[in-house]
Amino acid sequence: MSPETSFLLQAIAWPLVLLLAWLLADALYVRWQIPRVTSYVAVGVLAGGVHLPGVTNDITGLPFVATVALSLVLFELGYRINLRWFQANPWVLVAGVAESLLTFALVFWATGWLDDLRLHVRLAIASLAMASSPAGILRVVHELRSAGQVTERVMHLTAINCLLSVFALKVVMGSRTLRVSGDWSQAVFGSVHVLATSIAVGVVLGFVVPRLLKGRLSAAGDGATVVFALAVLLLSTAAYGLKLSPLLAALTFGIVARERRVHLTHNQRNFGTAGDLLGVFLFVYVASVMEWADVVSGLALGLVLVVVRTAAKVAVNVGTARISGITRRKGLMTGLALTPMSAFVVLLVGQSGLAGFDLAEQTLSAMAGMVLVLELLGPVVTQRALMAARETHVSQET
């Protein structure tokens, strides 16, 4: 193959793969109602597995683009969080924290029994297992135009899961730093500094951007969407440069911005066509970085961890259903809808590696089987759970 041909194949590989993913996802959704996210992941897995020229995670800038795409999703998730709901019904907050802690404990226990993993790898896997996938869940919610008790509860619990997952992983990283270097100040400052500064950056933008919008743009117009998207891009770039957590900062930004009373309409959610394109890229990219050898070797452990994680989320949500104001059936649907766990975890592990966590690659390899199963099947479970809860509003024509 000539150098010109090789360069051409590499140049057009990503556009072709994204186009294929979009067309396949649309066809399968219309015919069998398979969530589009699942199709995106399947195409990414195949493209990465056959080592398609140009489809590689070695290309400079791709991880940053994926981070921006996920940051937009996390901003939207934060924008849908109503902090006053936790005050009115604190049992939702209690359920989210209890479910996350139980998931951590059971996954940590399971990794100790089923595989010979290092302590900090087990702690990192347990921390990451607490998280649900905001990107996967929001995509399914948008497709189904879902709204209701279960949908809103899933949104709020997902935010709690993600926040606690980031906090727990930072603690694990600090503990690892202490064990390797023996420097208390470095271990504590590294974790506390990243968490506090990331939240502070999100809070500042959450106050500043809505103030600018109220004075210069119509909050109901497209201008608000563009400004928020640019603000998230600025936040992600600054977080990368300062070695902060862009995911935590974006989620905080969305939560604070909502409290400032600048509202996005339903049509503005998901950031329009640009958000759709970035969403396709996000899932294809995340799936393409998974190594087949790691998936195959860790599939048995992955399946056990999927069962343990799902059992923890379902048990807590069913157990707290009545006291938190819903039926046990809706509690079951809520727990099942939290099944997806994909892009957030993969990118969080990658960022922890850039921040100096020397066991990041080993952690992702150990949980590759679990991540792939939940990437492919998680959105389907969420879709069916929301349908069973009768909160979907997809028209017959759609």
Image (tube, rainbow, N blue to C red):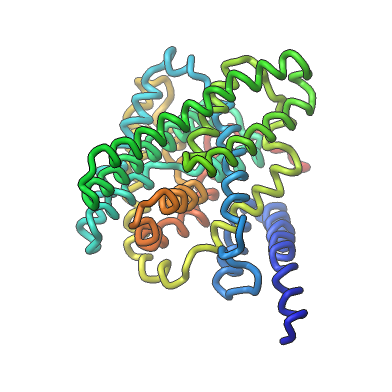
Identify which residue is drawn at 36% across, 23% down. 322
Residue 132 at x, y percent in the picture: 45, 42
Left or right relative to 272: residue 149:
left
**Residue nearer the viewer, 302 or 228:** 228
Q: Quadrant of residue 383?
A: top right
Identify which residue is drawn at 31% across, 42% down. 103
**Residue 341 in view (yes/no):** no
Which quadrant: the N terminus? bottom right
**Residue 266 in view (yes/no):** yes
Q: Quadrant of residue 263?
A: top right
Left or right relative to 230: residue 292:
left
Vertical side of 166 occupied by 180: above or below = below
Identify which residue is drawn at 56% across, 32% down. 77
Q: How many marks?
A: 0
Residue 181 at x, y percent in the picture: 24, 50
**Residue nearer the viewer, 265 or 383:** 265
Identify which residue is drawn at 65% across, 54% down. 281
Which quadrant: the C terminus? top right
Vertical side of 70 occupied by 41: above or below = below
**Residue nearer the viewer, 204 or 106:** 204
Vertical side of 250 occupied by 136: above or below = below
Left or right relative to 224: residue 147:
left
Residue 308 at x, y percent in the picture: 31, 49
Left or right relative to 276: residue 305:
left
Residue 113 at x, y percent in the picture: 20, 58
